Amino acid sequence: MKKTMTVSLNGSIFNLEEDAYNVLHGYLKRLEFHFANEEGKQEIISDIETRIAEHLRETIKQENQAVDINEVNRIIKIMGEPGEIEGEENMKNNIQNDYKSYRRLYRDTDDKILGGVCSGIGYYWRIEPLVLRLIFVFTLFWGGLGLITYIILWIVVPPAITSSQKLEMKGEPVTADNIGRSFNDARK
């Protein structure tokens, strides 16, 4: 029989076995130490906790299921240790093997003219947003189809607000270092 602990990660409650809790707690402490001198430390840690909570939700099959140490270690491997020094190609290959890397469709709130729809679709399909903007303008003159489509997409497609969402939009792995780097890039 193992002792379990109830923890809250970014507002979500999880049951962790005691050894899993100790590993996760140590990981979060290392992250806090790594980002201690960063201007937006709390927001970076919050984004990372959100991502960890998403991974935990994916693995829990039944209510009140306790998360074991193997699952916590798998999530830490996906997220990456803070300040890992590894060749960039090796790091990308390891992450690609351990993480379902895929792009998600979001509106890009950083590079927008109206709602960020074209920029978000551009990241998703890897097309220059200017091409998409021109397509919408040309279809605007064909019975207003472009305008109607744009408005529907503006309503339906969610905006990329957090660092994790912006990384997913760009198809980059959501790791601790990438979240910190994207947060710092946004500050500049």
Image (cartoon, grey):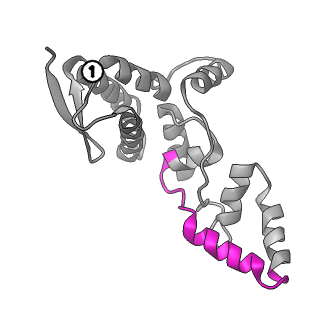
Q: Give SS at disc 1.
A: helix
Please state which of residues 38 and 17 is positioned toward the viewer in this rendering.
Answer: 17
Q: Is residue 85 magenta?
A: no
Q: Looking at the image, which is closer to me, 94 or 45?
A: 94
| Location of residue 17 with respect to 7 vertically, above or below | above
Q: Quadrant of the N terminus?
A: top left
Considering every residue shown, the one lying at the far front of the view is 62
In magenta, the rendered stretch is 140-164
Seen in the picture, residue 121 relative to 147 is either above or below; the reply is above
Closer to the camera, 82 or 48?
48
Q: Quadrant of residue 167?
A: top right
x%, y% of residue 147? 72, 79
Instruction: Please provide percent x and percent y for residue 86.
Output: 59, 17
Name the residue located 29 percent from the left edge and 21 percent from the top edge.
68
Is any atom of residue 52 visible in this view? Answer: yes
**Residue 52: where, in percent of width, then height?**
39, 35
Q: With respect to residue 71, does 120 lie above or below?
A: below
Using the rendered view, name the quadrant where residue 178 is placed: top right
Q: Give the amino acid type for the residue marked by disc 1 in the picture.
A: Ala
Residue 144 included in the magenta stretch of the image: yes
Question: Residue 80, position in %: x, y?
Answer: 48, 25
Q: Is residue 108 left or right of residue 140?
A: left
Q: Residue at position x 30%, y 28% from top?
A: 29
Q: Where does label 1 land, which residue?
A: 20
Is 67 on the left-hand or right-hand side of 151?
A: left
